[in-house]
Amino acid sequence: MKLSLKDSISQALQDVVNALLAEVDATKIPAVVLTRPKQKEHGDYAVNIAMPLAGLLKQNPRQVAETILAKVQFPDAVDSADIAGPGFINIKLKAGGETDILKDIMQMAESYGRLDNNNGEAVNLEFVSANPTGPMHVGHGRGAVVGDALANLMNARGYKVHKEYYINDAGSQIGVLANSVWLRMQELQGIKITFPEGAYPGDYIIEIAKEILASQDFASFEALDDVSRLQQLGELAVNANMAMIRSDLTDIGIEFDQYFSEKTLHESNKVTQLIEKLEADDLIYTGTLPPPKGKEVVDYNPVKQRLFRTTDFGDDVDRPLQKQDGTATYFAADIAYHADKFERGFKHMIDIWGADHGGYITRVQAAMKALTGLEKQPEVLLVQMVNLTRDGVPFKMSKRAGTFVTLSEVVEEVGKDAVRFNFMTRRIESQFDFDLEAAKAKDAENPVYYVQYAHARIHAVLRKAEAENIRLTDIKDIDTSLLTSDEASKLIKMLIAYPDMLDTAANRREPYRIATYIMQLAAAFHSFYHKNRVIMDDEALMQARLLLLRATAQVIKNALTLLGVSAPESM
C-alpha cells in the first residue's frame, strides 16, 4: 500500500532516528509522531522527536534537531523545515503539497483508511446478548449499533473480529417465561388465570402462546408434569423470542458470526468441569460471605457456600459458584463461557454490556486471570441507556412489550439509518436522549440527514456536469495544486485525517468518533460548496474541484459504511 504524504514524512524522520540510535546502546527507539500545529504560521506539521532523543544521544534537543534536519531526506512535497524553541521541528509543505491525496483516495476507493487484516489479531466481540425473554428495547439497540460499528471499525484497522451473541437460555428467567406462556395458553382456552407479579407482560407472550397452539394441541401440554411442560414451553418460547430478536437485528443491518447458547455449557458439563478444575487447583473453599456492602442488612444470616478465591486475583470479595441446592450460579456459567472463548483461540475478548453491569467486571476479569493468566480480560465497554422522547416529551411504554418501547417500533418509525447514526453521535458512557421527531426531520439539525445530504449534493453536481457534457479528466492529469482556497485546504486536511481518526477510534474503542468526523467533514464540504464555484469556465480548476468533490464523497461513503448507514446519491 502506498504511503500517504504524512506517513512518508514520518518514515523519512524515523529512518534518521534509527540511524542515529544505531550508534548508541538504545534499548527502545522512540517513534516519530507528526502533529498539526495550532497556528498556521508554524507550518503544516510539527514533531518533537528531538526531546526523547536528547537523553539517549547525550546532546541538547536543539543540537539533535539540527542533526536530524541535516540528514533527513524529505519527500518532494516538503518545502522547508525549521527548528523552534528548545528543539521542535516545524515542517512546511509546498503550495498544493498535500492535494495529491485526492488521487490516492480515488485510486484506493473503499479501501482508503483500511488496513489489511490477513495477519490481524483475532478478537471475540460479544454484544447485545439480550435475554431471550422478549423483544429488544432501544437500550439493546444502542449496544447493538455500537458493537456492530466497533466490529466494522476494528476490521478496517487490521483486526479479525468475530461477532458473537450469548443467549442466556438457562436459569430462572426461562422458567418465568415458560410459566407466562402457559398462563396465556390457558387463558386462550377460556380458563380464568391470575397473572402473578414478576411474570412477563406484553402482547408478545400471547402471540407466542397462539403460535404454539396453532401447531400443537393444548391437551398434550396439559397432560405433562409441571417440570416437563415448563421445559418444553421454555424451549419453544426462547426459539420464538430469538427469531424475533434476529429479525430486529436484521432490520438494523446486524448479523452475527455466532450465536452461543448458555444451555449448551450445562448440557456439555462445561460448567461442572470448570468447578472441578478450580477444586483441583485449590481455588474453591467452603466459607461465608460478609453482608453486602453499601446497604444495611437486618439480621444478616451468613450461610456456608462454595466460594471461588477471586480475591487472590484482584476481586474485592470471593464469589459463590454454587447455590445452596448445589446448582451452578450465573457467575459460574459466565466464566465457563469466557473460558470457552479462550479455548477457541481468543486471547483478546471485548464484551459490550449495559451500564448497570459495571460492578460485574472485576469478578469476571479476576476469574479469567485465575483460569488463563490473562490480565483485564474480557475488556468491557459499558453502554448507557437511551431516553426516548417525542418533541421533547418522554415517550410512553409499548403495549406489545408491556414495559418498554421496542427497537422494532423505533426503526419502523424513523428508519434504520436514523437509528444507527443517531446512536453513534454520543460517547457510550453518556446517556442519550433520542427524539423521534428530530430523527425524522429533513434539515441540518438532523445529523444523519445533514451528512447524507452532503453526499447526495456532491452526486447532484456530478450529474449536472455530466448533463452539460463535461468529461472528467483522467485523474493523473489533474493539477490538484490549483486547490488553494482556505475552504479547499480545510477540506483536504480533513480527508487526510481520516485514516488517523480511524486508528484513534479503533485503539480507544470509540466508534462515535466516526460520526463526529463525518459531521465535521460534511460541514467543511458545505462551506467549500457555498464559497467555491465548481462548474465553471476555468477547465483546469473545475477538474481539480470536481476531483475534490469525488474524493470527499468517497470518504463520506467509506465512513458511513463503517457505521452501517447508507450513502444515497439523491435525496
Image (spheres, grey):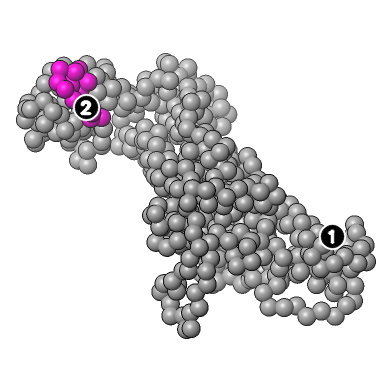
The circle drawn on residue 27 is 2
Crowding near the residue tagged with mark 1, few <14, some 14–19, many ≥20 C-alpha atoms within 10 Å: some
Tell me: 270 left or right of 353. Answer: right
Count of picture labels: 2
Q: Is residue 553 above or below residue 449?
A: above
Front-lying residue, 153 or 370: 370
Q: Alpha-carbon distance for marks 2 and 1? A: 68 Å
Q: Is 19 inside the magenta-drawn segment?
A: yes
Q: Which residue type does callout 1 highlight?
A: Glu
Q: Can residue 279 be seen at all in this image of the molecule? A: yes
Front-lying residue, 412 or 193: 193
Which of pointers 2 and 1 indicates the residue nearer the eye? 2
Q: Is residue 307 above or below residue 202?
A: above
Q: Position of residue 88 (x, y in %)?
A: 14, 33
Magenta residues span: 16-32
Q: Is 272 inside the magenta-drawn segment?
A: no
Q: Which residue type does callout 2 highlight?
A: Thr
**Residue visible at 68% across and 56% down in the picture:** 169
Q: Secondary structure at mark 2?
A: loop
